[in-house]
Amino acid sequence: MKSASQSRDRGIPEATVARLPLYLRALHGMAERGVATVSSEDLAVAAGVNSAKLRKDLSHLGSYGTRGVGYEVEYLVYQISRELGLTQDWAVAIVGVGNLGRALANYGGFVSRGFRVAALVDADPEVVGDTIAGLNVEHIDELEAVIKRRGVSIVVLATPAAAAQEVCDRVISVGVTSILNFAPVVLSVPDSVDVRKVDLSIELQILAFHEQRKAGGPLMAVDGQ
Amino acid sequence: MKSASQSRDRGIPEATVARLPLYLRALHGMAERGVATVSSEDLAVAAGVNSAKLRKDLSHLGSYGTRGVGYEVEYLVYQISRELGLTQDWAVAIVGVGNLGRALANYGGFVSRGFRVAALVDADPEVVGDTIAGLNVEHIDELEAVIKRRGVSIVVLATPAAAAQEVCDRVISVGVTSILNFAPVVLSVPDSVDVRKVDLSIELQILAFHEQRKAGGPLMAVDGQ
DNA sequence: GCTACTTTGTGCATCGGTTCACAAAGGGAT
DNA sequence: ATCCCTTTGTGAACCGATGCACAAAGTAGC
Ligand SMILES: NC(=O)c1ccc[n+]([C@@H]2O[C@H](COP(=O)([O-])OP(=O)(O)OC[C@H]3O[C@@H](n4cnc5c(N)ncnc54)[C@H](O)[C@@H]3O)[C@@H](O)[C@H]2O)c1
Ligand SMILES: NC(=O)c1ccc[n+]([C@@H]2O[C@H](COP(=O)([O-])OP(=O)(O)OC[C@H]3O[C@@H](n4cnc5c(N)ncnc54)[C@H](O)[C@@H]3O)[C@@H](O)[C@H]2O)c1
């Protein structure tokens, strides 16, 4: 996962990688509006970051700007896409087709940028065999076979917490090294596997922390009366 | 520097705040299993972090451990909960009851930790009036009234991207200062408002970046042979 | 070609966060 | 009370990320 920060010039900082999709989205919007070139200042505003940070981020990819002018939108879109690996198609499997898995399967935003939902897998006999978002839901017993057959390289985990580690182990056993986990558990994986987690509950708790601080202030007088 | 004020140092690092929910979850699991005390080492493993980091994090809340013994589970749960503001109930409104909003509304994980879905709001006449997860879906025209009436302090945005900024502005106008945004847009808000974003597409792109790197390496040799 | 202006790319100071490593603090045994 | 063992809490070194500020590199007008 957090594998050695390689000495190669290919060593793009993790913080930069996390922002590239943001720039890409802003650039796509500009391309649609027919904007041909953009300055770091304008792009930074659109992406909600500081312009010096943006320039430094882009400098890690190469020197793709023109001083006195800015960046050519189409060209930059291509360069960032290439760097992120979006010039190829990624087959994604969603395991656990409940409330959340269904929402994800029906979501169009995936497909738009190089990601293709290639398989849906669930354990519930009620759900297996259903067609959701044009895809047949397959049985968890077939998990390994489905992943290999469809060339899945990214797995989205949307099972209950209790099942997540086992599913995780199984997909890793057939070579998957990228996992997006929605289940509220800490997955244990080899260093070679990337896990990113999305945890709603954590986000709300962080908001609550700040909200409490705002409300209470330095004195926090609870006048329950 | 703002230390040396009479009360406890309120400046908890942001990175620490983001991990407290993780510790809390691990502690809840331990409490359920009847564990009375836990060492920083064990808790760190359960939460998936380094034990020195965990100790430093907890030290920001106060000295709640006993040297040679560890931390009392129940007590630590209480202290972290209090710090995060989970000893009170937070009323949450979900705006945009589509694929995602529905999944969130039906999700039990919210309620479990001090959060209560208090309102569902949508613009689609087909959806308004429906009952989802025991709640009546209200019309977007009523947005401000509903938020005030139900005492909502946290808003979850699950509308299409195009509608997010407007809804955001409106909820801020009635005093909301905490927003969890699922729409793929950069929201523009005053400094006093906290926005956290969850962006699926960005997570996948980050995974793709690392996946590409693993697969291709510096030379991108497709070793057919 | 020369000057005036714009904008990139980056050196550098700074900051927040992580990790190491250890003295201090406690428990338990004798 | 003393010794030994465990574990906390934290000083300090380290590391990556941020943002300022400016030289370098380009455009445009004359
Ligand atoms: N729904 C949300 O808004 C939300 C929000 C945050 C986190 N989560 C988390 O996401 C996960 C899914 O949530 P949900 O609301 O969709 O739950 P759900 O119960 O609606 O869906 C879970 C699905 O996983 C399937 N499943 C169970 N065991 C399985 C296994 N071993 N292999 C494959 N599939 C299996 C079930 O049959 C079910 O269809 C949970 O871990 C939940 O905590 C959900
Ligand atoms: N579904 C997913 O898995 C997923 C994943 C990542 C991001 N998102 C984002 O989350 C948002 C919602 O996604 P979705 O799949 O649920 O979309 P959806 O189209 O199913 O639902 C959107 C809902 O918002 C309502 N709406 C539209 N305009 C509104 C307004 N002005 N005020 C109130 N409600 C309004 C619509 O009536 C609809 O019910 C989108 O921005 C999407 O990009 C969704």
Image (cartoon, coloured by chain):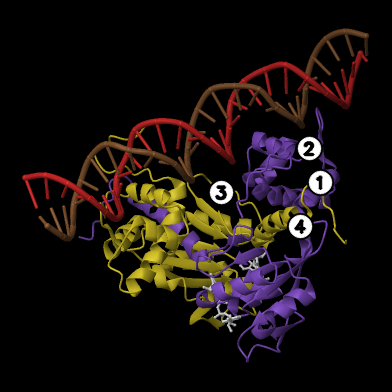
Chain colours: A purple, B yellow, C brown, D red
Q: Going by the image, does A26 lie left or right of A201? A: right
Amino acid type, callout 1: Gln
Q: Which residue is mark 2?
A: A62
Q: Are marks 4 and 3 in contact (CB under 8 Å)?
A: no
Q: Are marks 3 and 2 in contact (CB under 8 Å)?
A: no
Q: Which residue is mark 4?
A: B215
Residue A76: horizontal and vertical position, in percent?
Answer: 81, 44
Q: Which residue is mark 3?
A: B189
Q: Are marks 2 and 1 in contact (CB under 8 Å)?
A: yes
Q: Which secondary structure, mark 3?
A: loop
Is there one chain holding both mark 1 and mark 4? no
Q: Give the image quadrant in which the ligand numbered 2 is located.
A: bottom right
Mark 4 and mark 2: Cα distance apart in space: 22 Å
Q: Which secondary structure, mark 1?
A: helix
Q: Earlier in the sequence, mark 4 or mark 3?
A: 3
Mark 1 and mark 4: Cα distance apart in space: 19 Å
Mark 2 — on which chain does it sit? A
Q: Which residue is mark 1?
A: A79
Determine which quarter of the picture holds residue B197.
Answer: bottom right
Ligand 2 within 8 Å, label 2 CB: no
Mark 4 and mark 3: Cα distance apart in space: 40 Å
Ligand 2 within 8 Å, label 4 CB: no
